[in-house]
Structure formats: structure tokens, C-alpha cells
Image: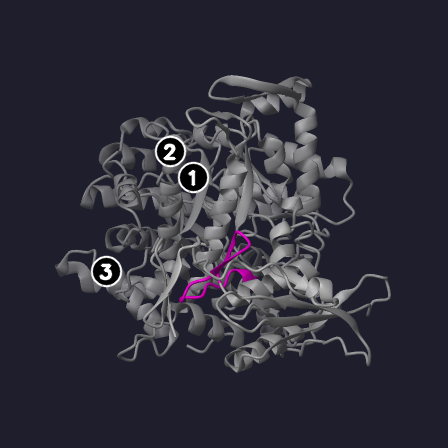
Amino acid sequence: MAFDSPLAGEIWSSKYRFRPVDGEGDQTVEATWDRVATALAEAEPAKTRARWRTRFREALEGYRFLPAGRILAGAGTGRSVTLFNCFVMGTVPDDLDGIFQHLREAAVTMQQGGGVGMDFSTVRPSGAPVRGVGAEASGPLSFMDVWDSMCRTIMSAGQRRGAMMGCLRIDHPDIEAFINAKREATRFRNFNLSVLVPDAFMTALDAGADWPLVFNGEVRRTVPAADLWDRLMRATYDAAEPGVIFIDRVNATNNLAHCEVISASNPCGEQMLPPYGACLLGSINLARLVSAPFEAGAAMDEAELGALTRTAVRMLDNVIDISRFPLPAQQAEARAKRRLGLGVTGLADALIFCGARYGEDQAVALTERWLGVIRREAYRASAELAAEKGPFPLYDPIMLEQPNLAGLDPETRELIARHGLRNGCLTSIAPTGTTSLLAGNVSSGIEPVFAFAYKRKVLQPDGSKREEAVEDYALSLWHRLRGPDAPLDSAPGNAFVSAQTLTPEHHLRMQAAAQTQIDSSISKTINCPEDIPFDAFSHVYRQGYRMGCKGLTTYRPNAITGSVLSVEPTPAVSTAPTAPVLTPRPVRLEGATYKVRWPLDEHAVYVTINDSDDEGDGKRRPLEIFVNSKNMAHYAWTLALTRMISAVFRRGGDVSFVAEELKAVFDPGGGAWIEGRYTPSLPAAIGGVIERHLGLAAGDAAADAEIAPAATEATATPVRPSPSACPRCGTPGLVRKEGCDSCLDCGYSRCG
């Protein structure tokens, strides 16, 4: 079938299309569906395999069921990748060897495409004694910096941005530093952060009581609960993080409470998982299941919704058997509990088709009804699978007493009591990001439509961003059915509402309604207006707790964070991309030239950055960069680099990411030690220049030593390492023999 938009075709081609070195691979999206259906049917007995392959293929047709990206991209390719999106790593031990072993496990997991979550509450606080070595602990945040750097390294080596969730309990002695961490715009760029809040804290908050900060049962100090909550809310108000996870509620409502304790979530928050927990995702596209959209009789085809749910459960259950796992512990955990994360996408569009305004009573009722159908049919399908293939190994009849199962209808409970369950958990609601764009830009997850026509910033391989004009699926269908000039306010129920006009209360009502029908959790952002009073903002979280939400994430426009999407100032409907606006270059600019001494090169590299006060506010911003050296081997790549970075500078906005991306570049031939600091490549050294020029590394002694402005004779020549120092390890063990420099200490060798 043809794609609904050029962006959908581009996403399929770049993210989900299989292109082997030899052979044709996927020539069309239908070929992708064929590949995935065939791969998932391999878990079925040979005599029924063809029948199930046909059923699976029918579910994928027309984007009705959207397996998560790892499944679409990896199933049936033979590649050594996992088909699971979500992992929580093992309990982080409070010792150096164990911490770095867990760092390695996280790196391996992300290398295969999995996002990871970690609870750092088990790491002793900053300043605590480290017995046996006479030192003080650096605390969990210092080790999170190591994780962040590792994630950036993995990302620079692969095609996909790494994703991590870092969690810390609100009673950990370092909680205040954790709460404030994202106020630094350059720190923890690869982490989402969440604070684990138990019921006892919310009780102390309501009572105006003090709250103890403890580690290993020892109270380190006590703070007023209200002050700590205010600090958390202020950070979230200003920087959109950390999020909040009501961890006791998560465990109290967990189907698998009889055999696990949860202390962290996956990066987006929809899967609360135990140590080494894994979950795979898939979404039913509600927008494709509404009959007679925009008509008086518009309705969800609930029979088709139920049938599609049952097929989707079987498909995802089969993924558990055919998927690879980064770690044996993850495989053991996944197959012992056979956890699924079946969710939905296109909810907001489906509500528009039915004339229901997001967040209002009719929309809340329809959401509960539709998700209730999915819940019932998912449990029935899992019970029937248990009768056919056996229940999951850790199944216990005590599960029928858990809240998610206790509220099921008697017929479904009887089916479970008779056969057990194939899957320990069945439903969650994930963000559907690029898969919703692939399906014609249906609304994502249970989120409202962000905007009906907008520009999406698409990250390019070189770190720059381009803008892509996108139109919502509901708006596209409205124009096809009613004409391009049909006013939106003439739609039934005046249902064309977006995130730009909804109140936080609308968001809360929808999240709370959905949570009543969902096993695990929900990834959702509660959008708040920029001018929302702080007290009203803080009330959103307390109200969400009272309404039964398991966690909350908000976004309020602020100076620290950016956004992936930007709304058009006028209701444009054209999907034609527009060219970026570049700041014109004035005749005269002021700037600075920096001299970089790279130990592996006899010629210095000169970096010039020129600034402009183009907005007339007295703040200087970089407008262009030049990189020059007498070494002509550098000419081509430095010229390309300067042209690309200058283009990014001239587009304006926050350009700090340029420095960070350059600093993540690793030279396969090895980096160098410069004044006691390891610099992984010459481009990384140039990134350090940009960082210093932007004022992001002010006071950094190492940076000052390795890179000096070349404006005066006194600063033109930085201190250089000893000629006999090894550029890899920095030790004075470098010897020259047989035309090669060799290090006697680390084995480094370079000839020529």
C-alpha cells in the first residue's frame, strides 16, 4: 500500500526496512509485514504455522496492529538483536567491581537495541566512608555520569539513540542533588530521571511532618517533607524532570507481587519491572477501527477490536520464544513470567471520529470501555494460550486475588482459574513515536493530538536537525471526506482539540481512566501552560496520586528544555517542507582563535569561532567556525566540519549539543592524553574548544591547559606533554625503535 505521507515512507526506509548485504530484503512495507508475520509464526507447531502466519499478516495489514520498533526492524532478519524494547537492569551493588560489571551489562543491552532502567538507591551516598581504603564515596550521581558517558559512546557507534531511566528513592540522602541534576542543561542528557515516592512520604506530606533520609537503615538527616516536595516540584516546573513514580502503588497492584519486587521502570515509564525484567511492546491502532468516522453513527468496531487483541497477544507471546536476549538473566526472567506490554495508539483520533472531546465525560467513558474490551480479551486469550501451551512457569493461583484480576468479569476469572495464564502481565501503554508516524501520523499512545499541523525536528546523522511538516491522521481524513476547506469547528462534538488547548485536568482524567484498565503503567505527558502558577502545577501531582495514577510526567515550556515538535503559528495544512532560515552574515564579526596541540600531530590545529549579536540583546552567539592546520591530511574533513557546524550555528537556538556530539567521537586508532585528561579524538578536542567558547566548561583547568586562545604570544602555546609520554596512557614509557613509537606500559604502537 502507498504511504500516507512522505515522512511515513522515510521512517519505514530508515528504521524498519530490512536491507541485507546480499539479497533484496524488504522492497515494500508489505514485505516487512510478510517478514514479521513469518518470523512470529515460527514459534507455532509446524502443522498450524501457515494458518497463524496468515492471521498475523492480517493483523498487520493497514497498520491495525503495530508491533514495537524492535520487532518490526529485527524479526526475521537473522541479526543478533533483541526484539524487546524495555529492560530494567539488575540491582546495582554498592561496590566498585559490581558497579562496573552492571555498567557493562547495560552497555551490552543497549548495543542490541534495548532501553534500560536502573535504581541507583542501593549506592551509598556522597561522603559516606569507604572502609578499607580510607576514602569517601562519591555517591550515585557520579556513577550515573559514567552511565551517561557510556550511553553516549554506544549511541555514537550505532544508528539509534540510547535510552536510560535513572531512579532514586526520595529517602536517599543524595535525593536533593538528584532532583536538581537536570537544571544543568548538559548533564544526564541520555537519562530520563524519576523519583521513587512511597505512600509513607505522601502521608508525611499531607501531615506536614518531617521525612528521614536513610541508607542501610541508618538515618543520615531529616528534612521537612513539604520542603523536599517543593524542591522536587520546582525542578520539574523549571526543567520538566524528574518524573514521579508512586512505587508502593506499583508493587501493590502488580500481578506478579507474589514473586517479585519492582524498584525501577524502563526509560519511558510504561513498564515497571523487577531486576533483569524485560517486556516487549505492541499497540492496537484504534484510529483504524472506527466505522463511519465523523458520522452520527460513528463507533468503535468492538468485535474487531476483541479479535485483533487476541491475535496480538499470541503474536507478542511468540516473540518471547524467538527473540534473542542481551543477557542470560534477562532471558530467564522473561521466559519465567512471559510479560507482555500490549497497548494502544490512535486513541485521540478515534475519539475525534466519534465526536468525543479529549478529557471530557464522553471521552473518558469511551476510553474506559475500549480499553476494557482489550483487557478482557487479552486475559481470555492468555488463559486459552495457557490451556494450549501451558501457563508461565511462575504462575500461582494467588494472582486471582490481585487487583487487576479481581475486577475481571466472572467468565474470564473462571477461565483463568481453570487454565492459568500464559502471561504474567498483559497490558501497558507506551509512547508510539515513530510507529504512529509510520501509520499515517495517528495520535501517539493515549496522548491528545499535539497539533493538527506542525513541524517535526528530525535529527540527522551529523547531529544537525531538519524540519518536516506533518499533518495529523484525523485532520487528513477530515479533509478527504469533507473537503480541504471544511472548518474544524463543524466536526461532530467540536472534537478537534489538541494539547495546546487542553488543561492539565483533561490529561489527568484520561490517564486515570486508562490506568483502571491497564496492568502495568502508562507513558504519558501532562502538558501544562507556561504561565501555570506554581501551586497549581504542584497540585497536578498530588491530584494524580489521589486519582490512582502510578506515575506522572509533566511538561511546561521552559528555558532549560527544548521540544521535538514546534507548532505552526497559523493552521497550515500543507505537508511541503520549508527551508531553514539562516542568520545572514554581517560584514564584520568578532571572535576568538584557539590553538589545539594534538600530541599525535606535529602541526597545531587552529579553531576560530566568530560571534554575532544578531538579536540585539547584548548576548553574543556563535555564527561560524573555521578549523585550519598545516597538515593537509586534515583539509577535507575539517572543511566539511566547519561548513556543517557553521550552518548549525546560523540556524540559531541552543547549539550546545554540537560540542557534546563532537566530544563523543572516538578515533579507532586511539585518542591521546592531554594534561592528564583522555581525549578520544581530534574532533573531540575541537568539541572541547566549542564547549569552552560557549561557556559550558568555564573553570575547567584541564580544558584551559590543553586549549588556549591564540590571541597573544603568552597564551599561544599551551603546556605540552613530555615528548616521551605515551599519547594513550600518558606514562613516560614511549620508546622509538624500528621506525615505530611503542609504549612499554600499555602496548600502544604507532609507526611512521
Coordinates of residue 624 in the picture (x, y in percent): 70, 73
Query: Is residue 347 depicted above or below 553 in this figure?
Result: below
Query: Is residue 275 depicted above or below 147 in this figure?
Result: above
Quarter of the figure that contains the C terminus: bottom left
How far is mark 2 from mark 1, CA to CA? 7 Å
How far is mark 1 from mark 3, CA to CA? 26 Å
Name the residue carrying label 2. 255
Name the residue carrying label 3. 41
Say which residue appears at 71% left-offset and 39% top-offset.
537
Q: Is residue 637 left or right of residue 318?
A: right
Of callouts 2 and 3, which one flags the residue occurring earlier in the amino acid sequence? 3
Coordinates of residue 453 in the picture (x, y in percent): 65, 68
Front residue of 329 and 650: 650
* Mark 1 secondary-structure assignment: loop
Of callouts 1 and 3, which one flags the residue occurring earlier in the amino acid sequence? 3
Coordinates of residue 507 in the picture (x, y in percent): 63, 45
* Mark 2 secondary-structure assignment: loop
Residue 488 in view: yes
The segment highlighted magenta reads 661-680
Say which residue appears at 62% left-offset and 35% top-offset.
177
Say which residue appears at 55% left-offset and 39% top-offset.
194
Front residue of 143 and 205: 143
Dot 1 amino acid type: Asp
Coordinates of residue 529 in the picture (x, y in percent): 74, 49
Q: Dots 2 and 1: beta carbons under 8 Å?
A: yes
* Residue 329 picture quarter: top left
Dot 3 amino acid type: Ala
Q: Is residue 635 left or right of residue 225?
A: left
Name the residue carrying label 1. 519
Determine crowd level at label 1: few under 14, some 14-19, many 20+ residues with C-alpha closer than 10 A: many
Seen as rendered, the residue at the extreme left is 47
Query: Is residue 585 depicted above or below 239 in this figure?
Result: below
